[in-house]
Image (cartoon, helix red, strand yellow):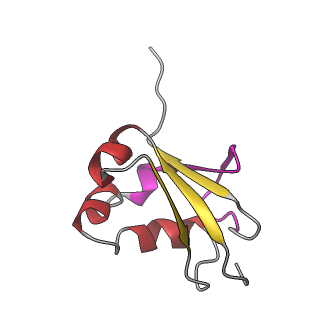
Amino acid sequence: MTVATEITLRYFAWIREKTGRAEERLTLPPTLQTVADLLAWQATRGPEFADAFAKPGVIRAAIDQRHVKPASPLAGAREIAFFPPVTGG
């Protein structure tokens, strides 16, 4: 992201439980370029985020309600959601 814009971050399931919040609006550091960058940064935001994002490889993300891969760029995103893998039964 080259321009500092406010973005909505949403948290689901155990990620919401560990962070203690369902969503938040904030301005991301301009150094964050990809979902993987954002996942790593999240783990530095305090103990509750360190716990929630300790295993970034298992967390799934969606940008503007579309599932994305860790290498996906953040540019232009208005909303990013984080959730654990969905399993069926």
Residue found at the far right of this picture: 76
Check the image and name the residue furthest to the left.
Answer: 47
Quarter of the rendering occupied by the N terminus: bottom right
Magenta segment includes 65: yes
Q: Position of residue 86 (x, y in %)?
A: 49, 31
Instruction: Report x, y in % for residue 23.
Output: 47, 51
At 70% from the left and 59% from the top, the residue drawn is 78
User: What residue sits 70% from the left and 68% below the top?
Assistant: 73
Quadrant of the drawing holding the C terminus: top left
Residue reaching furthest to the top: 89
Q: Give how far across and how far down residue 19 sits, in percent.
A: 32, 54
When the figure is inspected, residue 68 is found, relative to residue 39, above or below; the finding is above
In this rendering, would 87 be left or right of 75?
left
Figure quadrant of residue 74: bottom right
What residue sits 56% from the left and 49% below the top? Answer: 81
Q: Is residue 46 above or below residue 52?
A: below
Magenta-colored span:
56-73
Residue 41 vertical position relative to residue 63 in the rendered view, above or below: below
Q: Residue at x 34, y 75 (%)?
A: 44
- Residue 82: x and y in percent read 50, 49
- Indicate left or right for 9 with 73 as reference: left
Q: How many marks?
A: 0
